[in-house]
Amino acid sequence: MGTTWYTPPLSNGSIFYYWGGPAWMYAASSYPYAYASSVGAIPLYYYAATGPSSEFYSSPESSIDSSQEAAGSSACDGDTSTELASTSDEDLSWGSLTVGILTNLVAKLGGSEVKNFRLVCRHWRGVVDHELESLSPTAMLSATLVRRFPNLKVLHLTNCNNVRNRDLLNISRSGLRLHTLTLGDDMMKPWVTNLGLGHIAQITSLTSLNLHECSNVTNNGLAALSSLRGLASLSLKGCDKLTNAGIEALQRHSMLTSLNLYGCMRITDKGLHALTQLRLVSLHLGNTRVKDEGLAYLAQITTLQELHFDTEELTDAGVSQLTSLTRLESLALRDCGEVSGDSLSVLVPALPNLISLDLYKNFTMDDSQVCYYHVPGLSQAHLSAMLCELNTPSAQNSWFTDFSCTD
């Protein structure tokens, strides 16, 4: 079947979409920068590099047969012998578009559209892969990864169950300038060890490192990360072999501002004393051995803006010590059953910048206690969530009149 062509009134640099089935497209030599998908049902983009001229695109009513579609794919892969269409003396294939033009196109696309863009042909996929800065693969082929994605900045390996220490070695030697790396270990068959952390320590460009459920990592492995001088964010969630000695090693990271110790079950109050040497902005603690004495150390970290406790054995006496944290914007006391409204009635008014308060599963509180700590800056969403988890009557209090519990 033939193809019907239209000449839309497009301005220089505009974009239009074609949501039809498989299609191909040709633009006159004065406007050679356009593409259509051979996989169907994805946007058709137009990129203009010169002034207004004659632009052509396939109408939704048109279609092509399988031989034409195959010809388009072949041409995109570099076979310029197939003639796509002609409106001038010069014929152009998809594969003839330069890297610079395709790079500009990629910059205009969203995440899902980039995925579709990669499906057009090998040439276009190569351009996307070269420019890609964030990746979350489902399988690890480290040699292929470092070759195809040379400009990666963010790498999340939580969905890979076949990553090994040798893969981390390949990545560390590749020259990738990663600034964020996330590892999620297999709890049934842990693979991340201190050796792997030694390889990670060679990626000195890292500013954010997330080690989740890495149960084979010990204090020695954490100490090996001292070469990461620019590290600003560190998550050790579920690294249950770490002790206070490992936390003390973090003092070498003078740039560290965010720390997650959820699930580090061997950390005690003494470990928190080491954190007073850091200018932390965010700290998460959960299922540790921290008690009221440790909160006295935290009260000295006056740079904190976010402080979250989850399932900790805290009492009113400990929480009341946090009044010095005047920069605090977010406070969570989730499932800290010994904390009552008595301490919060003292603490919350002392925190002028507080905008989020999370009291999930603190069932010891009732409406009469909750109403003590009215702070204008608290967001309605967080208060509503707090109210739901407290299971209080709520509606009678004007403070909560406009809130609804939907979860």
Image (cartoon, rainbow, N blue to C red):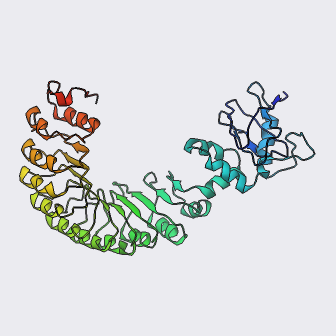
Which quadrant of the structure image shows residue 89? top right
State left or right for residue 254 relative to residue 140.
Answer: left
Is 38 in front, or is 10?
10
For the C terminus, give its image quadrant. Answer: top left
For the N terminus, give its image quadrant. Answer: top right
The outermost residue toward the right is 89
Is residue 135 visible in the rendered image? The answer is yes
Q: Position of residue 223 (x, y in %)?
A: 31, 73
**Vertical order, 371 against 225 (above or below):** above
Please tell me which residue is depicted at 39% across the width and 75% down the height of the picture. 227
Please tell me which residue is depicted at 24% across the width and 55% down the height of the picture. 327
Please tell me which residue is depicted at 9% across the width and 42% down the height of the picture. 341
**Vertical order, 185 against 340 (above or below):** below
Which quadrant of the structure image shows residue 119? top right
Is 170 in front, or is 332?
332
Q: Position of residue 98 (x, y in %)?
A: 75, 55
Q: Position of residue 388 (x, y in %)?
A: 21, 32
Q: Position of residue 60 (x, y in %)?
A: 73, 27
Which quadrant of the structure image shows residue 46? top right
Is 275 in front, or is 75?
275
Please tell me which residue is depicted at 80% across the width and 37% down the height of the picture. 55
State left or right for residue 188 relative to residue 345.
Answer: right
Is residue 322 visible in the rendered image? The answer is no
State left or right for residue 320 relative to residue 256.
Answer: left
Q: How many marks?
A: 0
